[in-house]
Amino acid sequence: MGKGSFGIGGCIGAFVLSIYLLFLIVYGLIWLISAIYKKLSESAKTEQTFHRKKYQSYTQDFNSKKKRTYHKKTHSYKTQGNNRSKKKEHYQKSDLKAKALRVLNLKGNESEREIKKAYRKAVKKWHPDNNHNWYAEKRFIEIHDAYRLLLNLKKARAI
């Protein structure tokens, strides 16, 4: 008899213990899931407030700019840009003149006759029929362009 009562009591005790452990595991999982949910909801709320504030600042900035008029500033920027382009054009012309003078081996204050004389001398030297170098044709074209440029500048000053 002693064996039977101990066996049944031991089984019931083990059963109760296993149910208690199962209850603790389930309760622990529920607690863990609720903690994770709470953390996720807090981070979502902070992210929502961050984006809400960011959106409000963008809309305020947009609305404040919408009321401005940019006509005067734009006009001053346009005139400033035109001045820059004129300066750039001036420097490009002076660079072209300097290059043309170098091509024809001139000093800078020669007459039309001297320019024509230097042109004929350079053309005679660099004409592709007389000079068989691979760059002779390119050099010949440069000489012709330089001559045209210098003559046009002289004519423009004479007027």
Image (cartoon, helix red, strand yellow):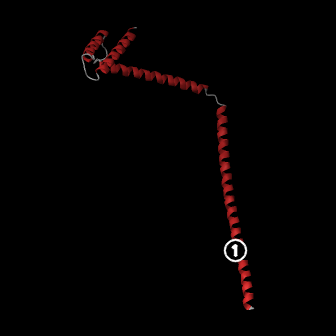
Quarter-wise, where is residue 146 in the image? top left
At 67% from the left and 64% from the top, the residue drawn is 32
Badge count? 1
| Left/right of residue 87 with respect to residue 33 in the rendered view | left
At 40% from the left and 22% from the top, the residue drawn is 92
* Depth check, front residue: 88 or 119: 119
Residue 149 in the image: above or below residue 27: above
x and y percentages locating residue 12 in the rendered image: 74, 81
x and y percentages locating residue 129 in the rendered image: 26, 16
* Depth check, front residue: 141 or 154: 141
The disc labelled 1 sits on which kind of residue? Leu
* Depth check, front residue: 118 or 140: 140
x and y percentages locating residue 152 in the rendered image: 38, 12
Quarter-wise, where is residue 123 in the image? top left
| Left/right of residue 133 with respect to residue 4 in the rendered view | left
x and y percentages locating residue 72 in the rendered image: 59, 25
**Secondary element at tag 1:** helix
Q: Quadrant of the C terminus?
A: top left
At 35% from the left and 16% from the top, the residue drawn is 145
Quarter-wise, where is residue 91 in the image? top left
At 66% from the left and 42% from the top, the residue drawn is 55
Residue at image mark 1 = 21
Residue 112 in the image: above or below residue 23: above
Q: Quadrant of the N terminus?
A: bottom right
* Depth check, front residue: 156 or 13: 13
